[in-house]
Amino acid sequence: MIFADVNIKVPEGMIMYLRPKNPRAELERNALLLYPYINDRTISHGKAAEIPCIPKYD
Protein backbone atom coordinates (compact mmCIF):
# COMPACT_ATOMS: atom_id res chain seq x y z
CA MET A 1 0.00 0.00 0.00
CA ILE A 2 1.29 3.46 -0.88
CA PHE A 3 0.80 6.25 1.65
CA ALA A 4 0.69 10.01 1.13
CA ASP A 5 0.74 12.94 3.54
CA VAL A 6 -2.31 15.19 3.55
CA ASN A 7 -2.73 18.50 5.34
CA ILE A 8 -6.17 19.36 6.69
CA LYS A 9 -7.40 22.29 8.75
CA VAL A 10 -9.08 21.32 12.00
CA PRO A 11 -9.89 23.18 15.20
CA GLU A 12 -6.93 23.19 17.57
CA GLY A 13 -8.85 21.17 20.15
CA MET A 14 -9.04 18.23 17.74
CA ILE A 15 -5.29 17.84 17.22
CA MET A 16 -4.72 15.54 20.20
CA TYR A 17 -7.42 13.16 18.90
CA LEU A 18 -6.10 13.01 15.35
CA ARG A 19 -2.66 11.69 16.26
CA PRO A 20 -3.22 7.95 16.49
CA LYS A 21 -1.67 6.11 19.43
CA ASN A 22 -1.52 2.73 17.68
CA PRO A 23 -1.97 1.18 14.22
CA ARG A 24 -5.61 0.19 14.90
CA ALA A 25 -6.50 3.78 15.86
CA GLU A 26 -4.80 5.05 12.71
CA LEU A 27 -6.72 2.57 10.56
CA GLU A 28 -10.04 3.55 12.16
CA ARG A 29 -9.30 7.26 11.73
CA ASN A 30 -8.48 6.78 8.06
CA ALA A 31 -11.57 4.67 7.48
CA LEU A 32 -13.79 7.29 9.11
CA LEU A 33 -12.41 9.96 6.78
CA LEU A 34 -14.18 8.09 3.98
CA TYR A 35 -17.60 8.10 5.66
CA PRO A 36 -18.93 11.30 4.02
CA TYR A 37 -18.18 9.79 0.61
CA ILE A 38 -20.06 6.62 1.49
CA ASN A 39 -22.94 8.67 2.86
CA ASP A 40 -23.32 10.77 -0.30
CA ARG A 41 -22.80 7.64 -2.46
CA THR A 42 -19.61 8.90 -4.09
CA ILE A 43 -18.01 5.55 -3.25
CA SER A 44 -19.46 2.20 -2.22
CA HIS A 45 -18.96 0.50 1.14
CA GLY A 46 -16.82 -2.07 -0.63
CA LYS A 47 -14.55 0.53 -2.21
CA ALA A 48 -14.29 2.40 1.09
CA ALA A 49 -13.19 -0.84 2.78
CA GLU A 50 -10.78 -1.71 -0.04
CA ILE A 51 -8.82 1.56 0.20
CA PRO A 52 -7.50 1.04 3.77
CA CYS A 53 -7.53 -2.79 3.38
CA ILE A 54 -10.37 -3.47 5.82
CA PRO A 55 -12.78 -6.39 5.42
CA LYS A 56 -16.05 -4.89 4.14
CA TYR A 57 -18.17 -5.94 7.14
CA ASP A 58 -15.68 -4.67 9.72
Image (spheres, rainbow, N blue to C red):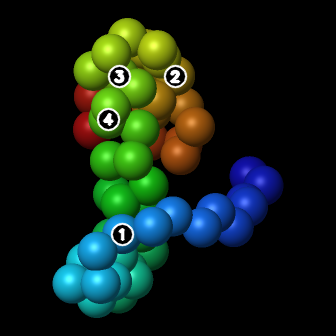
Could you tell me how far apart the alpha carbons at marks 2 and 1 are, in whole angstroms? Answer: 26 Å
* Circle 3: element type: helix
Mark 4 and mark 1 lie on one chain; the one further toward the N terminus is: 1
* Circle 2: element type: helix
Disc ID at residue 10: 1
Q: Residues within 10 Å of mark 1 (few under 14, many from 20)?
A: few
* Circle 1: element type: loop
Total numbered badges shown on the rendered structure: 4
Q: Residue at x 46, y 14 (%)?
A: 42
Could you tell me how far apart the alpha carbons at marks 3 and 4 are, in whole angstroms? Answer: 5 Å
Q: Nearer the viewer, mark 2 or mark 3?
A: 3
Q: Is residue 45 above or below residue 6?
A: above
Amino acid type at image mark 1: Val
Disc ID at residue 35: 4
Amino acid type at image mark 4: Tyr
Disc ID at residue 47: 2
Q: On the image, numbered disc 3 is attached to which residue?
A: 38
Answer yes or no: do the residues labelled 3 and 4 have beta carbons within 8 Å? yes
